[in-house]
Image (spheres, grey):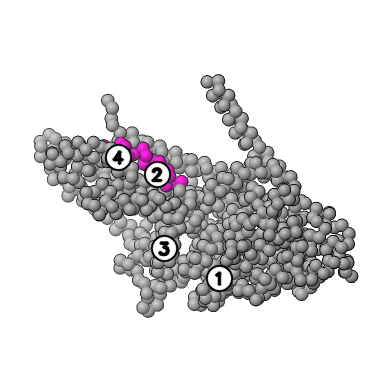
Amino acid sequence: MTIQIVALVGFMLLISWLISNTIQNLETLGKGVDLWFLFETSSYDINQKLIEYTSRSTHLRAAFVGLINTLIVAVLGCITATVLGILIGILRLSNNWIVAKIMTCWVELFRNVPVLLWIVFTMAILIESLPRPASFRGENPESSLLFWDSIAITNRGTYLPEPLFSNGLGDISIFGIFEVSLDLVAFLIVLFACIFVSNILKKRADKTQQNTGHRPRVWPYRIAIIVIPPIVLLYILGFYLGKPELKGFNFQGGIYLRNSLIALWLALSFYTSAFIAEIVRAGILAVSKGQTEASYSLGLRPSLTMNLIILPQALRVIIPPLISQFLNLTKNSSLAISVGYMDITGTLGGITLNQTGRELESILLLMLVFLGISLGISAVMNWYNSTVKIKER
Amino acid sequence: MKIRFLVAAIAAVFVTGSAYSATLDDVMARGNLECGVSTGLVGFASPDAEGEWEGFDVDYCRALAAAIFGDSQAVEFTPVSTKNRFTALAAGEFDILARNTTWTFSRDTDLKQTFLGVNFYDGQGFMVRADLGVSSASELDGASVCIQTGTTTELNLADFFRVNGMSYEPVPIEDNAEAKEQFFAQACDAYTTDRSGLASTRAAAENPDDYVVLPEVISKEPLGPLVRHGDDQWADIGRWVLNALIIAEEKGLTSANVREMASAPTNDPEINRLLGTEGAYADMVGLPNDWAVHMIEQVGNYGEIFDRHIGVDTPIGLTRGVNDLWTNGGLIYAPPYR
């Protein structure tokens, strides 16, 4: 005990010496710790920005743009990696020899090559193999748009049709910091309200079924309630799809998914899916074989057995290590700069750091941000874990 | 990348203390010079077929090594990206940074660097494919522009398009090698960097005639070597190595004739002072008496270095232009050596 306390005190002394030494040395250099640089004009442009940003905005805002970009790729990546990972993990246990081996190859290929190489490799493939915007030009273009001229896939990125409203409600500014489309808000409110009403119908049907043993036919009404009001709303707002068009050097209009985002997203998803697949496989194998046999003996088909018997039990084993994979994916997204994706490492930890020379402050802020994101993910996943784990009474 | 910064930040904790000790002593004790260069810009700094670094900036470091050790090979080169260069220099990863770096006010003051002079007067330009039919940068509205991140060119680009009321799509990239890949694959319409860099990139293309450098020069980019704040003697050495290279060209000292000129005092006192045959000027800065002789003999004068790596007879093919001596109407000018 005494030794532990002495060690702790020694460790804390070492840390405080390091911190005071750093601050003192920086002050001798005339570079005291100072966060005011965040409120200076950034003077650089960022290509992918979901909130209003120009080169006249502050470094702080640039950091926010980067943070949003980090979150975009992290969320997209986690979703895709989970879906792929579960699919591959299950298929790897398939009784079909070819399917099982293909999935083994996928897992071994992706998890045994560094993720940075996958990111750069994916980007190189996208740049070199996809058609250039120029090849869409002319009388007989080499390439053409897909799906009734609505999707353009180029070596700069993919342009998707964009939802637009001819008599929309406009935007609402929140604290003057960013703007939210009222059309989107209205659509979401209506959609959730409909889902709510539809759930009430379901509960009533369940109740009737329990009381009388006969289930009233409600599903057509439920579908109608979910589908019709949003469509009416879209019609009132004058919904139409804005298609990308080749104007000048590039396509204009539509939602522009840059190749840097796609490359980073795909590479991170594929890489992490290999790990998730192994976790899923381990989780499934952890469920006693007797459960499967019991399920089959009750006459359940394999797909139902998997969905109703195996997966719910396997989830308890799967969720905790899955959290680590989500955290890994999010942290790996800081490799974004290798393909020029402007995440927070690229803005705050890259250009801002470089232009202001505030290394210590920028890196510390960056570490705080990643710590915050990671703790957030952990909190959400731990909450989810507590809902699926065995309820002990 | 993150790890590199962390290492740099941690290194800063330990190294800043020693930044005040004499860099020259550290270099002498180590037995070689450590020099930060570009990750690969043909003509300025790139490894040749044998893996030996060569180029205009590389030769500046070789000249410095020759001045200190009498051996131009006593250098170790650390390739560093535009994004990491200042952090790495501040953290003491190398002694001097010679990496087409633009001398600006905030880098000089706020970033705590000491610029040693200008070894190349450059300006930012644009390169596009010839078949785009673009003849001026003002026609680039809506273009995708490849840009090395963490550079002054990035800021100039933003200002240029904003002031001219044009829009563009920045395609940020980490270094010149990646820029080449993206630009040649037409992932961007235009590539912008210093015009010397554009010439270098164009020379490396499969068919250089497919590309044109647009006439506009949108910025002043005086490039030069730099060291971190805190060691004036070291800065003086670096500054006067550069000046001596320029004076050597002005006075007609070349790698071929310098040994002969140094054998006995000549009629020109400045040559004598520089080559150590008159006075004890080298002592003032802590270099051996014949430092300039070794340097010029092994590396050549400013003009020789220029012609060897980026001059008209090289694939880069740059004319001297503003980088000619002041006596020939250029901007290259060194203070007197006395």
Front residue (pair A316, B194): A316
Q: Amino acid at mark 2?
A: Phe
Report the mark closest to the observer, 4 or 2.
4
The residue that appears at 30% across and 43% down in the rendered structure is: A281
Name the dominant secondary structure of the magenta segment: helix
Give the structural element (helix, strand or loop) at label 4. Answer: helix
How dense is the environment of label 1, judged by Cα within 10 Å: few (below 14), some, or many (20 and up)?
some
Chain identity of mark 1: B
Image quarter where the C terminus of chain B lies is: bottom right
Q: Mark 2 = which residue? A: A326
Which residue occupies the foreground of this view, B260 or B267?
B260
Tell me where residue B232 appears, x and y as whole percent: 76, 51
CA–CA distance in space, label 1 to label 3: 22 Å
Q: Is residue B96 left or right of residue A323?
A: right
Any part of residue B241 in sight? yes
Farthest residue, direction top: A2
The span picked out in magenta is A313-331
SS type, badge 3: helix
How far is mark 4 from mark 3, CA to CA?
34 Å
In-image side of B59 versus A44 (left or right): right
For disc 4, the marked residue is A283
Kind of residue sitting beneath label 3: Ile
Residue B204, labelled with which disc? 1
Q: Position of residue A99 (x, y in %)?
A: 25, 53
Which residue corresponds to mark 3? A125
* In the image, residue A348 above or below residue A382: below
What whole-number distance in Å separates the C-alpha atoms at marks 4 and 2? 17 Å
Q: Amino acid at mark 1?
A: Ala
B184 lies above or below A300: below
